[in-house]
Image (cartoon, helix red, strand yellow):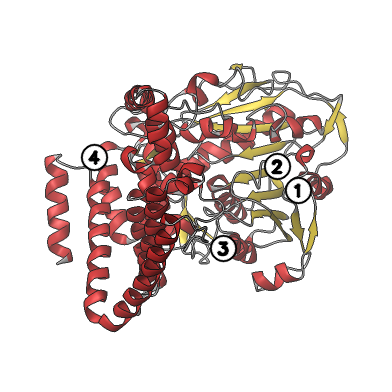
Amino acid sequence: MRRSQEQLEKWLGDTGLMEDTKLATLTEMSDAYRAMAEDLLLHPLRFAGAELDLTRKHLALSYYTLARVVGKDREPVVEAERDDRRFQAEDWRKNLPFDVLQQAYLINSRAFLGWVENMEGLPPASRDQMLFYARQLTSALSPSNYPVTNPEVLRITWERKGMNLVDGGRQLLEDVRQNPSLFNVGMTDRSAFEVGRNLATTPGKVVYQNELMQLIQYTPSTEKVSKRPLLIVPPWINKYYILDLTARNSFIQWLVNQGQTVFIISWRNPGPSLRNKGWDDYMQQGPLEAMAAVSEATGEDRMNVIGYCIGGTLLGSTLAWLKKKRRNPVASATYLTTLLDFSDPGGIGVFINDHSIRGIERMLARKGYLDGRAMAFTFNLLRENELFWSFWTNNYLKGEKPAAFDLLYWNTDGTNLPAKMHSFYLREMYLNNRLVQPDSLTVAGESINLSEIDVPSFFLSARQDHIAKWKTTYKGALVHGGNVRFVLSGSGHIAGVVNPPYKEKYGFWTNDTLSPDSDVWLDNAEHHPGSWWPHWLEWLGQYTGKPVPARVPGNGKLEVIEDAPGSYVRMKAAQAAST
């Protein structure tokens, strides 16, 4: 049956009737729902038990309804989670029909998800996939998503004489126009932000570039700087300015103010012309050429390097490659929410299987790249109520204009991924987890082994990270050679990293003993209030060298090409698709 499905998918893809990734996803969804139906038939008693519990709750809801009708106050049978914004409006509680409707929905959806979660004999990956698709279904069916079943929307429609729906329709058309051929719900007021005007404003110059990246050197704000420069390798799934959103929250500006000579890679937004750029190219034309350029600009042959997310994954493979080559340009390495071990890839794991990846690869072969907007949409579905349906309701049903929020602007400003690189990344790392297997992965002609790295390293993970789960990043730290320090921040993938000291938020945990068990490490860790940034800077001080006169971009051997933030970062995913 799987063979016939694949042939059907290929035929539909070849005819252009549907994109290969959508076909693969639809097949995965149909397989998941079929498995649920089979479980129902094979385990009728378990289903009957769940149905009996569901009946009891609906009976209790009937008693609740009757009590409300006769004017008695009664505790709800079920209530939404505290962080569930869908039913927070007083309209849901005040109007009995809608109160009953939302409680019935919560009872049914939780029963359905509970039934799926308790299905027997499923491997964890299959269970997670089924839960994901079951959750997408229940979330889409929420009464809050439709105008006639949402009392708050009905009230606003009455008060505004329907203009909210008119305004919402205009916003929907504008979002479609902003994302030709690929719809993404509007998450922020795009007109409020411009890269180089009120985002990515730390002064600096582009001092080097190639076809994959521009290298920015930042203008010093202190008379003296650390002898060893600092190079940042950001992810190329999103743009580098997550570390330079606004001056007050900018990690880059803070580093400059601490007397660091800071360089950062700004990745190009690729289109089909770069389809054959692979992981090797990203390493050679990314951190390796950047390291050489930093040495040219500063005269220093050694530097400290930071890798963030997939930029850290690339940094790890680069250090292992350099070790094979007996080269040692890196004095210390810092990994921010980085997966080296992909045994538990987090929420994105529901899309990681051979069938789904083959669908992606067929699409990559045709287009030459993965559209960054599709990647953003996929990540949004991992928290669909918060990052899709809430905006759907506010924008298109209530007619509200999205607020100006710099982080959400960055989140929608995605980058495309070249076909060769993305296929390699999905298969060799996510699917086969070969990066942590000694000498299993060959990069630029060398088999690499992370345990051979002897560069001192600092791993920063985030406790609520759903993209790079902290216990999995901990496994990566265990296989990394050299002197390793692991620190756990509060919050998630972004806020856990971009946490400036003035906010005094989240806190972090430290433990100098790297136990084989992550839970043991945390049980014995010490909690510290506030930002991890000063703690990390103290650790970095061992490798920065003595102060030297500040270095001005262009005063070294590299000439200034253009002002920061450069031209590569301004290219939008849709524009890049035509290059």
Judging by the rendered image, the residue that carries numbered circle 2 is 499
Judging by the rendered image, the residue that carries numbered circle 3 is 472
Look at 59% across and 65% down and name the residue there: 475
Judging by the rendered image, the residue that carries numbered circle 4 is 366
Q: Mark 2 and mark 1 in contact? Answer it, CB < 8 Å.
A: yes
Q: Earlier in the sequence, mark 1 or mark 3?
A: 3
User: Which secondary structure lies at badge 4?
Assistant: helix
Amino acid type at circle 4 is Arg
Q: CA distance from mark 4 to mark 2?
A: 41 Å
Amino acid type at circle 1 is Trp
User: Which secondary structure lies at badge 1?
Assistant: loop
Q: CA distance from mark 1 to mark 3?
A: 20 Å
Q: Earlier in the sequence, mark 2 or mark 1?
A: 2
Q: Earlier in the sequence, mark 3 or mark 4?
A: 4
CA neighbours of label 2 inside 10 A, class few (<14), some (14 to 19), many (20+): many
- Image location of residue 214, percent across then percent down: 55, 27
Look at 40% across and 45% down and name the residue there: 421
Residue 532 marker: 1
Q: CA distance from mark 3 to mark 4?
A: 33 Å
Label 1 vs label 4, nearer the camera? 1
515 or 198: which is nearer to us?
A: 198
Question: Is 101 situated above or below 398?
Answer: below
Amino acid type at circle 3 is Thr
Question: Is 451 situated above or below 548?
Answer: below
Look at 43% across and 38% down and name the residue there: 152
Q: Mark 1 and mark 3 in contact? Answer it, CB < 8 Å.
A: no
Q: Is residue 528 left or right of residue 90?
A: right
